[in-house]
Image (tube, rainbow, N blue to C red):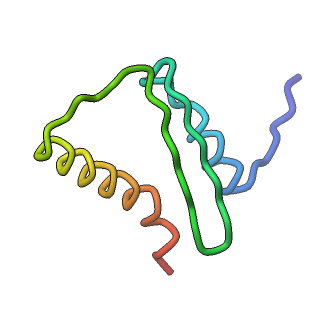
Amino acid sequence: MKRKVKITETQSKLLEAMKTACQTPDTIFHTEIKDKMVTCKIELPMALDLSDDESKILETNIHNAMELVFTQYFKK
C-alpha cells in the first residue's frame, strides 16, 4: 500500500518548476540570488549576431520573461 505524502505549497511550486524540459541545449545559466538582487548570466553555445533592433527586441523579451517570473513575489 502506497502512503500519500503531503507536500507544502512551496514544494509543489518547486516540483512544477523542475518538470520543465530543457529547451536551450548546451546553454549555461549562472544565477545568483540575494535578498534584494537577482543576477543571471547566460553563456550561449553560439554567437547571436544580432542587429541593434534585434538586440532591443531580445532585451524586451528578457525583461518581460523575468517580470512573469517575479510577478508572484509582488502580489500580496
The percent coordinates of residue 53 (x first, y second) are 11, 46
Residue depicted at 52% across the width and 50% down the height: 40
Residue depicted at 65% across the width and 47% down the height: 12
Give the quarter of the figure containing the N terminus: top right
Quarter of image, res 19: top right
Residue depicted at 42% across the width and 66% down the height: 71
For residue 64, above or below residue 28: below
Question: Looking at this rendering, what residue extends furthest in the left direction?
Answer: 53
Q: Is residue 60 left or right of residue 26?
A: left
Q: Is residue 54 left or right of residue 41?
A: left
Question: Which of 24/8 is in front?
Answer: 24
For residue 62, above or below residue 29: below
Residue depicted at 47% across the width and 75% down the height: 74
Question: Looking at this rendering, what residue extends furthest in the bottom direction?
Answer: 76
The percent coordinates of residue 45 (x first, y second) are 44, 20
Question: Which of 30/76 is in front?
Answer: 30
The percent coordinates of residue 63 (x first, y second) are 32, 57
Question: Which of 40/70 is in front?
Answer: 40
Question: Which of 34/23 is in front?
Answer: 34
The percent coordinates of residue 22 (x first, y second) are 49, 24
